[in-house]
Image (spheres, grey):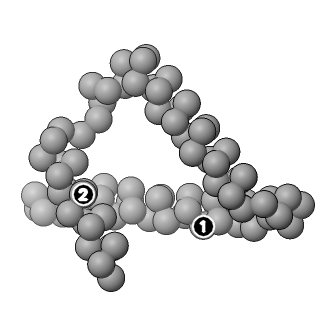
Amino acid sequence: MSEHRKVLTPCCGLRSGRYGLNIGFNLLNKTVFNYFPFPWTVSAIHVVVGTLYCGVAYLLGFKEASFGRVRLFASQQSGGSHLTA
């Protein structure tokens, strides 16, 4: 297996997994909004829960498992291109 393919295969798998989880998240939100039609409240709950989750993960030492600065910078460039599209 070539070096390029060794890198590309996990990357495609992670992107496919994220896409699938995003679809599930959107469907769950649509169901929640049928019973609780307050999008700002639901968004605020998402932010609070996400912040608590990241804080707990950071305190438990999962910071060492994160990407390095170079990878983080590359992902920020990709995110910036999504903003301009």
| Residue annotated with mark 1 | 23
**Residue 45 figure quarter:** top right
71 relative to 64 in the view: left or right: left
Is 23 displayed left or right of 31 in the figure? Answer: left
Whether residue 63 appears in this view of the structure is: yes
Say what secondary structure mark 2 lies in.
Answer: helix
User: Is 18 located above or below residue 57 in the figure?
Assistant: below
Q: Residue at x 18, y 57 (%)?
A: 74
Query: What residue is at 26 percent from the left and 73 percent from the top?
Result: 81
Residue name at image x 47 percent, y 59 percent: 18
Could you give the CA–CA distance between mark 2 and mark 1, rounded to whole angstroms?
Answer: 22 Å
Q: Nearer the viewer, mark 2 or mark 1?
A: 2
Question: Is 49 positioned to the left or the right of 79 in the image?
Answer: right
Q: x, y percentage for residue 12?
A: 33, 64
The secondary structure type at the circle numbered 1 is helix
Q: Quadrant of the N terminus?
A: bottom left
Q: Residues within 10 Å of mark 1 (few under 14, many from 20)?
A: few
In the rendered structure, which amino acid carries the disc numbered 2?
A: Gln
Front-most of 42 and 22?
42
User: Residue 41 at x, y = what percent?
Assistant: 72, 52
Q: Position of residue 25 (x, y in %)?
A: 63, 59
The image position of residue 46, as x and y in percent, is: 62, 47
Quadrant of the snapshot with the C terminus? bottom left
The kind of residue on which mark 1 rests is Ile
Crowding at label 2, few (<14), some or many (≥20) Cα neighbours within 10 Å?
few
Q: Between disc 2 and disc 1, whose residue precedes?
A: 1
Q: Is residue 60 above or below residue 12?
A: above
Front-most of 23 and 10?
A: 23
Tag of residue 38: none
Mark 2, residue position:
76
Which residue reaches farthest bottom?
A: 85
